[in-house]
Image (cartoon, grey):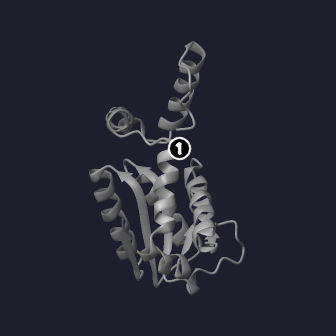
Amino acid sequence: YKYLPEVVDRKSIASIDLHVEKWISQFDIEDREFVLEHTYNLLSENYYSETRYDNLLRAIAKNEKNEKHFRSDCFVSIQSHGGSQNEITEKLNKFIRNEINLSLPVLSLDNDNADFSKFRHITYLDDFSFSGKLIGDDIEKIITDLELDNVNIRILVFLAHSQGFYNLKRRLSDFVKDNELDIKFHFN
């Protein structure tokens, strides 16, 4: 939503083109046409403005059923590409502070003493997932770098392409099996 200008003119179209080129470069070359086509279709049907994001996050913060998760889980900010995860987590944290006066623990790989063992779930929150590749890369990295085992990882995504999410589930299942880890994933 940040990259769409109020007034569309030649200058803004050039800016949008640069943003799209930068964004699409995160995907493998052979996947880019597919991702662009499906992104266009999704955005044509269901564009998320900043207000819509805020309303969604506010509703999550207000929902009493979520409070137990806010008290026992930690969120991570570990995206290797992009910054949407950090921004969404910060916004959600602001709404939680306003609604129930609680601050979410948000850990990153930069935390030298990040102790994930005291949390019921490690929660990876993001806005969109098309191929599942970036989420898979991030999750495998945190598991490997922090030598995680015997943990629960919750992956929350607002919108996901069903095939990409299916691939992500298979990839992570294979990863924990191949590395003989006891990690349970919960996908929402």
Percent across and percent down for residue 50 are 53, 44
Q: Residue furthest top?
A: 10
Q: Residue at x 57, y 67 (%)?
A: 76
Q: Is residue 20 visible?
A: yes
| The quadrant where residue 112 appears | bottom right
Q: Residue at x 51, y 66 (%)?
A: 61
Percent across and percent down for residue 125 are 49, 61
Q: Nearer the viewer, residue 169 or 188?
A: 188
In this rendering, position of residue 83 left or right of residue 68: right
Q: Nearer the viewer, residue 67 or 150?
A: 67
Total marks in image: 1
| The quadrant where residue 6 appears | top right
Q: Residue at x 47, y 36 (%)?
A: 24
In this rendering, position of residue 36 left or right of residue 140: left
Disc 1 element: helix
Pointer 1: what residue? 50
Residue 71 in the image: above or below residue 15 = below
Q: Is residue 121 visible?
A: no
Picture quarter with the C terminus:
bottom left
Q: Residue at x 64, y 74 (%)?
A: 101
| The quadrant where residue 100 appears | bottom right
Percent across and percent down for residue 82 are 57, 47
The crowding category of the residue bearing disc 1, from other C-alpha atoms within 10 Å (few below 14, some 14 to 19, many at least 20), is few
Q: Nearer the viewer, residue 32 or 156?
A: 156
Q: Amino acid at mark 1?
A: Glu
Q: Residue furthest right?
A: 112
Residue 69 in the image: above or below residue 43 = below
Percent across and percent down for residue 143 are 51, 72
